[in-house]
Image: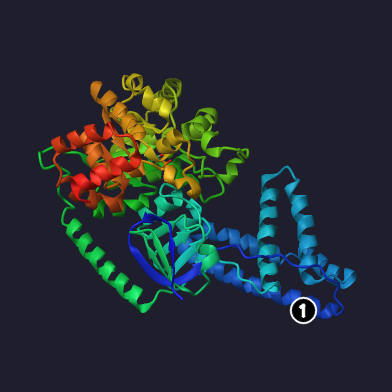
Amino acid sequence: MSTLLNGIAASSGIAVAKAYRLVEPDLSFKETVVDHVDQEVTRFRDALSISVQELETIRDRAREELGADKAAIFEAHLLVLSDPELISPIEDSIKNDKKNAEAALKVTADMFINMFESMDNEYMKERAADIRDVTKRILAHLLNVQIPNPSMISEEVVVIAEDLTPSDTAQLNKKYVKGFTTDIGGRTSHSAIMARSLEIPAVVGTKEVTSSIQNGDLVIVDGLNGEVHINPTDEVLAQYEKLSEEYAKQKEEWAKLVNEKSISLDGHEVELVANIGTPKDLKGVVENGGEGVGLYRTEFLYMGREELPTEEEQFNSYKAVLEGLADKPVVVRTLDIGGDKELPYLNLPHEMNPFLGYRAIRLCLDQQDIFRTQLRALLRASIFGNLKIMFPMISNLDEFRQAKSILLEEKEKLQNEGIEVAEDIEVGIMVEIPSTAVMADTFAKEVDFFSIGTNDLIQYTMAADRMNENISYLYQPYNPAILRLVKMVVDAAHKEGKWAGMCGEMAGDEIAIPILLGLGLDEFSMSATSILKARSQIRGLSKSDMEQLASDVLAMTTNDEVLEAVKTKLSL
Ligand code: PEP
Ligand code: MG
């Protein structure tokens, strides 16, 4: 039977493929006393040997596709599986205590996990994690359930998950993963942002895909309208075939604008630039006619690994991006970790409110060795292109002053070491905390530019967690409260002769773009895949009409009122 679920359209496009559940299986079991211990030992050995075979395949594939360093983790797991110090006590427990294999495995593994975890040594703590992982794998085989592994996918699928961490998303192989859909998350959660940069259609926040979809079900992910169809009828499939064709045609039209200017009907030019997460995203920026990079989220360099990236690794990435874009501007944001972006190896304390906690510039100003390493790498790379540096999560002027003075200290040190650094690097801030938007006039005297981070600015202004789908209705980019803050920032910048951009998702939103154009925003930074559509829209608008529209909507009272006004005015 065909079923329809609604969610949030997180990444445009349409995907039709079989479902692949990326969901942790239920590994609960009952402890029993066994009569035939030899049979039980055999059952355990069988589960062990299948686990070994499986891990060898995963390791080989990881080595081919991700490189030897990423494969090393599976090598470590294989070592654990061949360690008699772990395996013999499990078999002894089956033989002597007559425990079933599941219980013998769990008791023995838990003993080793506790022992390693209590050691004051990072290496040993990691061994505990290895044992936990391999135990899960053997247990799954004993219980005859499957542990999902995205790196083993070898046919076209739609991934079904409760949520995807940014590093899960980064590991999805575009060749096979045609789309994904999740129970939780919103348009600005990082899995959604990654999906857009990977150009994978996605619908998030459906609340119930994992409980409604089984492995192998045929699924349509409609990332244009936020719909998920499960085992669709032939009629629905035919409709989607048509919709896909229309969307492809539309994209061909937009593609004609790749080398054109982003200029309004009455000659006002703005900059349309891209948000990127890694140097690999550059290809998309160029193909989609990006006029530069308005937000390079450097935290992805730090994620999905076991330790901090070295200055040299960072330097190489920054240099690659700057060179890849020749003289086009590249705004690099310094490390913005925290919130939904975790770095397990920093061992940060668990917090009640991570989005309000120890994150981004707060962490960098506290752990200055991390910050200084990044700044040195950036400064060294600065001579290879048009670099601008931006600090995230600035909430007051002291933070900006402190961050900037650390930057200048590192610059001076490098110059004293005889290392060349570009002279004219602009230094700006993200405006994503209401206190900073309100004080934009004072900031404007000291910063070179602003980039408004609406994903966070909206969550902090509306007091609504951007990850929580139950309150996603409070993600209200057109709420006049947000529009007024945007206006304050743009006006404050212009008064001091500075420029104002926006790198939150709102900058690529077809309802917001006309208002932002009217408010005088100078730079719009968005997923590369949104650029051509936005350019096509701006080329059809008159700036002076949009000034009138902006002034009209600023006087309105609700998000929906503004939404309707823009739709009516522009026939959207
Ligand atoms: C923002 O907050 O709008 C932003 C662009 O940063 P991020 O989404 O990475 O928090
Ligand atoms: Mg942010």
Q: Is residue 50 left or right of residue 552?
A: right
**Taking 429 as reference, is 505 above or below it?**
below
Q: Callout 1: 10 Å neighbours few (<14), some, many (20+)?
A: few
- The kind of secondary structure element at disc 1 is helix
Q: Which residue does the image show at 52% across and 34% down from the upper left?
A: 356
Note whether residue 291 is visible. Answer: no
Q: Hey, which residue is sitting farthest right in the picture?
A: 96
Q: Which residue does the image show at 49% across and 75% down from the upper left?
A: 216
Give, as a three-letter code, the residue at label 1. Thr
* Residue pointed to by mark 1: 42
**Taking 30 as reference, is 506 above or below it?**
above
Q: Is residue 449 left or right of residue 131?
A: left
Along the viewing direction, whichever of 519 and 532 lies nearer the viewer: 519
Ligand 2, by image quadrant, is top left
Query: Which corner quadrant of the image does residue 416 belong to?
Result: top left
Q: Which residue does the image show at 45% across and 34% down from the upper left?
A: 460
